[in-house]
Amino acid sequence: MDTVEAWEFGRTVRRWRDRVGPEAVGVPAGRRRRASGLRREELAALAGISADYLTRLEQGRATAPSAQVVESLARALRVSDVERDLLFRLAGHAAPGPDVVPSRVAPSVQRLLDRLSHTPVVVYDASWTLVLANAPYNALMGDTTAWRGLERNAVWRNVTHLPSRVVHSVKEQAEHEARLVADLRLTASRYPADHALRRLIADLTAGSPRFAELWDAEAPPPLPDTSRRKTIDHPSVGPITLDCDTLLVAQDDLRISVYTAEPGTEDADRLELATVLGTQSLDA
């Protein structure tokens, strides 16, 4: 971006931050709030970036926000489609078109997520890159806000066996990895012109022999996962067995996973405790 664009991007983010009431995005307003809009640290948390980086963006000192950062800010600010496209242009990016894996959370989907604000929910795009995770999900599974680059991709996290609280047998883990890679292959066939997706596949291939093996395999993909039950080994409350339902938003090609427990069970009590403990830890 040139100097004018850099300044306009930051000034636009600041102006739109001031118009977003905290209650509209699920942020407690508190009694001592002077401004009606979001504080800088609140927007940064919602967008999954550091408050320092947001400060530099707003002041025009950071001049090359990635498309992912722009999308995250647009989502956190709850902007319209026209405003989202403007934000991309001010950041020096073309607005994502139909040939690019979408990560846009439509207002109707956001309203659904708002109604699940006390339930662990995570949203991935069609490349299995993290779009957003709410506070109860982070409390249950571990904080995702510091994840960057490939760390945000579920395929990478699984084929490289990065730490996870989900308990899988060796066979279950292998089948899960095969399902993820098979789904990514279908995504690649739907978005052949997406350069970021091609880079992701190249990085996965170069960085993981397991991914390369699955990507090149001629065997048919495994059967869909018919089990909705997942056990999470929480470090503070122990194992929690939950129902995990993954919903597909067809028009936006998003995957939304929702974790729930049957009311009145020990798992429900443990989930509630894990959420309280984790949320307190994240807020500390």
Image (cartoon, grey):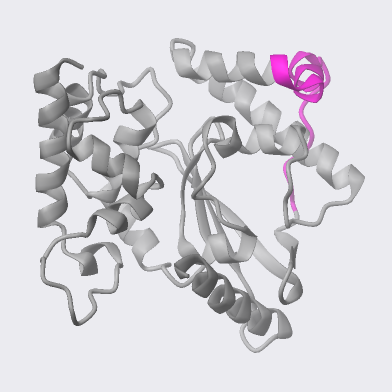
Q: Position of residue 170 (x, y in %)?
A: 90, 45
Q: Position of residue 55 (x, y in %)?
A: 25, 43
75 lies left or right of 231: left
| Residue 34 sits above or below residue 125 on the image | below
Pick the front one: 65 or 56: 56
**Residue found at x 82% / y 18%:** 213
| Residue 270 sits above or below residue 49 on the image | below
Query: Quadrant location of residue 239?
Result: bottom right
Query: Quadrant location of residue 214?
Result: top right
Q: Which residues are magenta?
A: 206-226
Return the residue found at the far right.
170
Can residue 228 be seen by looking at this rendering? yes
**Residue found at x 57% / y 20%:** 200
Query: Quadrant location of residue 150?
Result: top right
Q: Position of residue 99 (x, y in %)?
A: 38, 17
In this figure, what is the number of numbered marks? 0
Is 217 colored magenta in this rendering?
yes
**Residue found at x 72% / y 20%:** 207
Is 216 colored magenta in this rendering?
yes
74 lies left or right of 50: left
Can residue 120 be seen by looking at this rendering? no
